[in-house]
């Protein structure tokens, strides 16, 4: 990767300066805390910084199931760029048709209608608007839930810190996650609702609901005439070791939200996939909900290629197997800290959380891992939980490296906790 490391450390100072002057002083502060590492290149499971140091990418906020610059997605996107990257939007365009067919083929049966957007939050907005168009104004989501930060989606994202400066938001109720009885009570109390839940809460800190929860949500929504929106923006397309979080309980929501992995790690794209009944308002009038860059051919090429690559390379099964291996590896590496600095290690497939005793320890773990050459994330709604969303392409040597980095980080954390007397 030597050809990719033409940036010099001097560049870091000027980039920091531009961040401070034109992007965000807060982001510059964060970069300072993480050692001013500047990422400049990527391929497969790896990212390189400006000094040529290599990192194993187990973060990326859930975008890189296919790793970085997956060859099949790259090829499809480059071909589309050379031929027709943006559409006039007044004529038929085949890349959108291909992507919609590819997605409808692998979503639960009955979810046939696809509305493409550019970000996860816009997919949530699409679901909120579909619900309103059906006269279902009451919004219900769950405590700890994360559904995006545009003003509509933010009403569903249950974190006061993100909401406070922007109130009043759309009215929304948050019922305890994983508690079907609480949802039932809420549904009994008011008018027709739109219920939005995640199969596993990602940003909430990798929270797994009890078995049967999603099936209960579906049953309760049907019984109370509520629109059931399943937010699989983080969990979908194989992340959990199944095509969808909905798969194990054979759940079929009215609207399924997809994002992150749909991009193939290359071009931002997301979607709301609905049943014919739920989609009817947009089916009647295609101008009711539009956006200039939605379904741009270049994004459609990425989406279709990403779905095909996940399928052909059997990455769903691979995510399930790798997830088991990584959970085991983490338990071994962090064993000395369990019950002290580490409260719990949990996950499904390649969505894995390590809950620390406090936020500072979680921050320290992230920093030690960066130093050891592994990138992970914190959880936006649960700062005590360090999250891993690795690619389904990790090799045996990647796994060795992961184990080594966690063992090194565990030793450093053990020393820190001994100092603090935890
Ligand atoms: N929904 C879920 C479950 C998410 O995890 C996220 C992002 O992390 C979103 C919605 C929002 O997606 P985006 O950040 O692309 O707007």
Image (cartoon, rainbow, N blue to C red):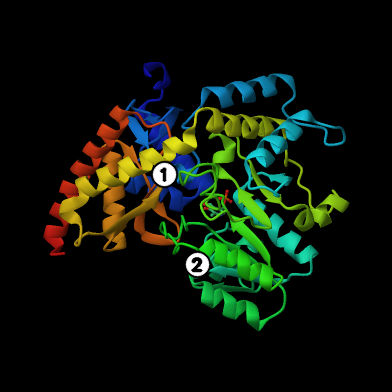
Any mark on residue 350, and which? 1
Give the quadrant of the N terminus. Answer: top left
Left of 35 or right of it: where is 250?
right
Q: Please tell me which residue lies in front, 27 or 355.
A: 355
Q: How crowded is the residue under tag 1: few (<14 C-alpha within 10 Å), some, or many (20+)?
A: many
> Mark 1 or mark 2, which is nearer to you?
1
Figure disc tally: 2
Q: Callout 2: helix, strand or loop? A: loop
Query: Does the residue tagged 1 have its C-beta within 8 Å of any atom of ligand 1?
Result: no
Residue at the location (27% across, 50% down)? 365
Q: How crowded is the residue under tag 2: few (<14 C-alpha within 10 Å), some, or many (20+)?
A: some
Q: Callout 1: helix, strand or loop? A: loop
Q: Position of residue 352 (x, y in %)?
A: 38, 49
Q: Please tell me which residue lies in front, 269 or 167.
A: 269
Q: Position of residue 279 (x, y in %)?
A: 77, 54
Pointers 1 and 2 in contact (CB under 8 A)? Answer: no
Left of 318 or right of it: where is 111?
right
Q: Is residue 317 shown above or below 230?
A: above
Left of 278 or right of it: where is 195?
left
Q: Position of residue 393 (x, y in %)?
A: 42, 31
Any mark on residue 171, and which? none
Residue at the location (60% across, 57% down)? 230
Q: Residue reaching furthest top?
A: 3
The residue that mark 2 highlights is: 159
Residue at the location (61% across, 39% down)? 268
Q: Give the CA separation, mark 1 to mark 2.
A: 25 Å
Query: Does the residue tagged 2 have its C-beta within 8 Å of any atom of ligand 1?
Result: no
Give the quadrant of the C terminus. Answer: bottom left
Q: Could you tell me if residue 140 is visible in this image? A: yes
Q: Could you tell me if residue 391 is visible in this image? A: no
Q: Residue reaching furthest bottom?
A: 189
Q: Position of residue 386 (x, y in %)?
A: 35, 53
């Amino acid at each position: 990767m030597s050809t990719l490391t033409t940036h010099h450390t001097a560049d870091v100072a000027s980039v920091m300066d531009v961040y401070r002057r034109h992007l965000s002083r807060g982001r510059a502060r964060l970069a300072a805390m993480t050692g001013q590492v500047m990422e400049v290149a990527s391929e497969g499971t790896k990212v390189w910084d400006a000094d040529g140091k290599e990192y194993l990418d187990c973060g990326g906020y859930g975008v890189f199931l296919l790793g970085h610059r997956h060859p099949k997605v790259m090829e499809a996107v480059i071909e589309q760029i050379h031929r027709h990257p943006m559409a006039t939007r007044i004529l038929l365009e085949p890349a959108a048709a291909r992507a919609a067919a590819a997605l409808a083929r692998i979503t639960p049966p009955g979810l046939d209608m696809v509305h493409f957007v550019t970000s996860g939050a816009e997919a949530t907005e699409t679901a909120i608007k579909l619900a309103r168009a059906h006269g279902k104004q009451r919004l219900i989501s769950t405590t700890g839930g994360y559904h995006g930060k545009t003003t509509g989606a933010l009403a569903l994202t249950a974190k006061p810190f993100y909401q406070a400066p922007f109130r009043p938001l759309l009215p929304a109720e948050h019922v305890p996650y994983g508690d079907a009885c609480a949802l039932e009570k809420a549904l009994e109390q008011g008018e027709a609702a739109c219920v939005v839940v995640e199969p596993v809460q990602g940003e909430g800190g990798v929270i797994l609901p009890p078995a049967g929860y999603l099936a209960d949500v579906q049953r309760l929504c049907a019984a109370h005439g509520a629109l059931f929106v399943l937010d699989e923006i983080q969990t979908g397309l194989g992340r959990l070791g199944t095509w969808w979080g909905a798969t194990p309980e054979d759940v079929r929501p009215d609207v399924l939200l997809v994002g992150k992995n749909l991009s193939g790690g290359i071009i931002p794209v997301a979607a709301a996939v609905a049943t014919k009944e739920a989609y009817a308002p947009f089916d009647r009038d295609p101008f009711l909900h539009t956006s200039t860059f939605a379904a741009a051919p270049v994004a459609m090429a990425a989406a279709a290629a990403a779905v095909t690559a996940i399928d052909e390379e059997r990455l769903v099964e691979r995510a399930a197997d790798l997830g088991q291996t990584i959970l085991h590896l983490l338990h071994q590496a962090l064993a000395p800290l369990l019950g002290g600095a580490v409260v719990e290690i949990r996950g499904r497939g390649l969505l894995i959380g390590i809950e620390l005793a406090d936020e500072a320890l979680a921050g320290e773990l992230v920093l030690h891992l960066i130093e050891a050459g592994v990138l992970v994330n914190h959880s936006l709604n649960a700062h005590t939980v360090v999250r891993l969303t690795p690619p389904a392409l990790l090799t045996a040597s990647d796994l060795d490296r992961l184990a080594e980095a966690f063992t090194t980080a565990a030793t450093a954390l053990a020393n820190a906790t001994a100092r603090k007397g935890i």
